[in-house]
Image (cartoon, rainbow, N blue to C red):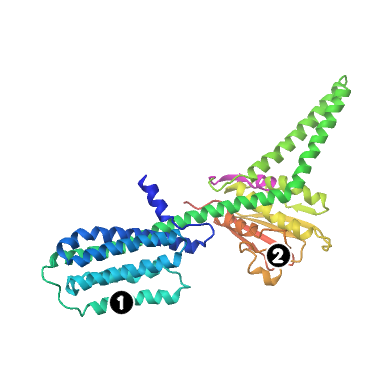
Amino acid sequence: MTIAVLDRLLSLGQSDAIPDRLARHVRVTNALALLGAAMSFGSTPLDAVGAPFLTVVVDLAATAAFVSCLLFNRRRHYFAARVMLMLTANAAILAGVLQVGAVAELRTVFFPLVLLPFLVLGTSERGWLFLFVAIPIAGYFVTGTMDPPPPGLAMTVYRVYAPVLTFTMIAAGSAVFTHVERNAEARLLQARARAAQGARLVALGEMSSGIAHEIKNPLAAIHLAATQIAERPDQPTLVAQLGEQIKRIVMRASRIIDALRLFSRDASADPFVAAPVERILGDALELCGKRFTEHGIDLVVDPVPTGLEIECRHLQISQVLVNLLGNAYDAVAVDSVSERWVRIEVHADRDRLELAVTDSGAGVPAAAQARIFEPFFTTKGPDRGTGIGLSLSRGLVAAHHGTLELDTESRNTRFVIRIPMVQPPR
């Protein structure tokens, strides 16, 4: 229950509409505001006993100001929340030093306040960053020239309290930032998984007509064979032949459905296991090979050495091939291309498998080569691509400690996948 409440407080002001970097700053601000409110309020008993009464008032005012940072974030006033946090922290320490004097060493708390702007401000807010770094530095030197503490101050207690408070602020700030960064990384991985799933669905949509044709033809053949059996039940040889034909057709349709089911599944948690390279290619071709034939595009696949296996998540490598073949199809299916062919090359040695997909297109324009793997960048026309297929494909290959590169030396468009035959120990 307590963890759930704390998470809700840290999430105040979070929204999918704000950038990831700002979202992290908002969470850090919320966490540090909670920490500041707890430390200010927790200091009131000590200050009530060992310091002037005005110090207690400062503690309560600082507590309220830190809480207001949470309210600012909740109302989407993100910058105001961060400025309030830094102003309150500096003002609270300055007021405390003014009350208890410099010799109580409370001014050492200005040290962690120098780090505070780096936790809650971005590099684009450079002016504010310099300002809130300069404020605690100036506060430290100015308060060093102050008068001795007032009579009756619990000097020994404050000389212990000040370094403890300083260390606590530094440690807590580091812990908060680490925790928020870890959560941000987890959210980034989730976002990438959702994007990968979206890319798969887009690819399935683009292949839908071909897949429908692949299923419709076997159904028509089964219907025809069943009709012939019904019309000539007295011819056992013919019935047996048609039965074998139906069996082959059903197995073909079953392979297509299995490939479709596997392709739509998230395989990021699958183990790395030895998989036949021939099966990897077959799963990809089951889904997208037919439309090449239907549109007069020659699809040539190099022979795969017998028994060749690679340690991988075979579904993910098949997905990469489907993406590359989809791009190749789009490049050569247009009427302006005179030669219409796509080739899959397979090369393997003891250490590495190399798969290359080449099409008869003229290659990627030089101006686009540097950006071809950027998310959402596409050389296709409007409404013809999302621009995430190559980016996600490179990520899937990188997860296999491999590379996906554009062969800039080729006169045609050629993408090359290189993956270790055996994955390194994790």
Query: Could you tell me if residue 140 is visible in this image?
Result: yes
Query: Residue type at mark 2?
Result: Thr
Q: Position of residue 58 (x, y in %)?
A: 25, 66
Which dot marks residue 137? 1
Kindly identify the residue that appears in the image at 82 percent across and 62 percent down.
337
Q: Position of residue 296 (x, y in %)?
A: 83, 53
Span colored in magenta: 270-282
Density class for disc 2 (Cα within 10 Å; few <14, some 14-19, many ≥20) is some
Q: 232 or 90, which is in the foreground?
A: 90
Q: Is residue 10 above or below residue 161?
A: above
Does residue 194 appear to the left or right of 115 in the view shown? right
Quarter of the picture holding the N terminus: top left
Which quadrant of the view contains residue 403?
bottom right
Residue that label 2 marks: 379
Does residue 125 appear to the left or right of 262 in the view shown? left
Which dot marks residue 366? none
Q: 298 or 7, which is in the foreground?
A: 7
Secondary structure, mark 2, is: loop
Instruction: Tell me how many marks there are.
Output: 2
Does residue 396 appear to the left or right of 339 in the view shown? left
Q: Is residue 155 above or below residue 353?
A: below
Which quadrant of the view contains residue 229?
top right
Residue located farthest toward the left when viewing the structure as drawn:
152
Asked if residue 407 is among those painted magenta in the image, a careful observer would answer no
